[in-house]
Image (tube, rainbow, N blue to C red):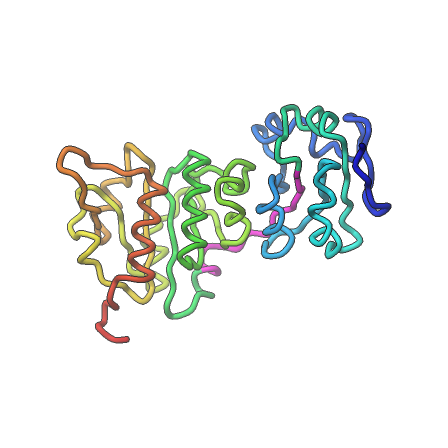
Amino acid sequence: MPAIIPPSIIPIDDPDDPRIAAYRDVKERDLVGREGRFIAEGAMVLRTLLTASRHETLSLLIADKRIAGLAPMLEALPAAVPVYSARQEVLDAIAGFPLHRGILGLGRAAAMAEPDALLAALGPRATVLVLCGIGNHDNVGGIFRNAAAFGVDAVLLDSGCCDPLYRKAIRVSVGAALRVPFVRIPAGTDPVALLERHGFAVLSLSPAGAVTLAGLRRPERAALLLGSEGPGLPASVLARTRTVRIPMAPDFDSLNVATTSGIVLHHLAFIAEPESGAG
């Protein structure tokens, strides 16, 4: 029996319908960029986009078999947000691959603040992440998921990092990339000087760090720098910051960068004593 589509839902029968052009050939469009727009995929990510995101929802495209289960969420949508629905085979033809989750949303990215303005607006106790040269979408998504879980106030990305609003990064983050504020650091900017100007203690993760994580006390304003897997952070950055290491088995010296972020952020949020000894 075909799914019953409520009157407010706009049925799509033709994959070439111009109304859903932004959803066509999803993977190919991801590669060339969406000029300030992004695709959110899956029920959990859609819920974040609609209820907790910093970004604007433009439209939804949902498999007809998923409409009934999403009814409470869809009923709360503003009338100006169109909801399109298609049979699974039509949805797959639009996306260009089997879309098993059957749920897509189109969003528009919020205007990005300047790094100085973002840091200046944070409170006296704050945690920020600074990502340097991390180009893997799975790692960026995982880092944003950890950032949301452990109360990070903002993420700063250098020019070598991939886009947190790339579809796969959003999906891996379970929507956290839509919630956690982030900014780009312009190429040529000195991130250490930027952070110190706003009173942040700058902590760099390195297998050769001078202090073990267990011995790290919590600065009131903490900035955690993470580098790409392999090269890590530049020596010039490590020389100017507090370096921290996570002890591990003697015949192994590295962790996945997203895993590292979770371990360190948990320590800063729940274990580390205040640097001042107060509190």
Quarter occupied by the N terminus? top right
Q: Residue furthest front?
A: 1
> In the image shown, does 104 or 227 lie closer to the viewer?
104
> In the image shown, does 240 or 26 lie closer to the viewer?
26
The image quadrant of residue 229 is: top left
Query: In the image, is residue 169 part of the stretch drawn in magenta?
Result: no
Q: Position of residue 122 (x, y in %)?
A: 44, 65
Q: Is residue 145 left or right of residue 49?
A: left
Q: Position of residue 42 (x, y in %)?
A: 60, 41
Q: Is residue 72 left or right of residue 4?
A: left
Q: Position of residue 85 (x, y in %)?
A: 77, 37
Q: Residue, x 37% and y 49% (percent of image)?
A: 130
> In the image shown, does 97 or 124 lie closer to the viewer?
97
Q: Residue furthest bottom?
A: 278
Answer above or below: position of 66 versus 190: above
Query: In the image, is residue 116 part of the stretch drawn in magenta?
Result: yes
Answer above or below: position of 255 versus 56: above
Q: Is residue 25 left or right of residue 168?
A: right
Q: Residue furthest right?
A: 7
Q: Residue, x 79% and y 37% (percent of image)?
A: 3
> In the image shown, does 129 or 39 lie closer to the viewer?
39
Q: Residue furthest left?
A: 250
Q: Residue, x 32% and y 52% (percent of image)?
A: 224
Q: Which residues are magenta?
A: 103-118
Q: Position of residue 186 (x, y in %)?
A: 45, 45
Quarter occupied by the C terminus? bottom left
Answer above or below: position of 10 versus 128: above
Q: How many marks?
A: 0
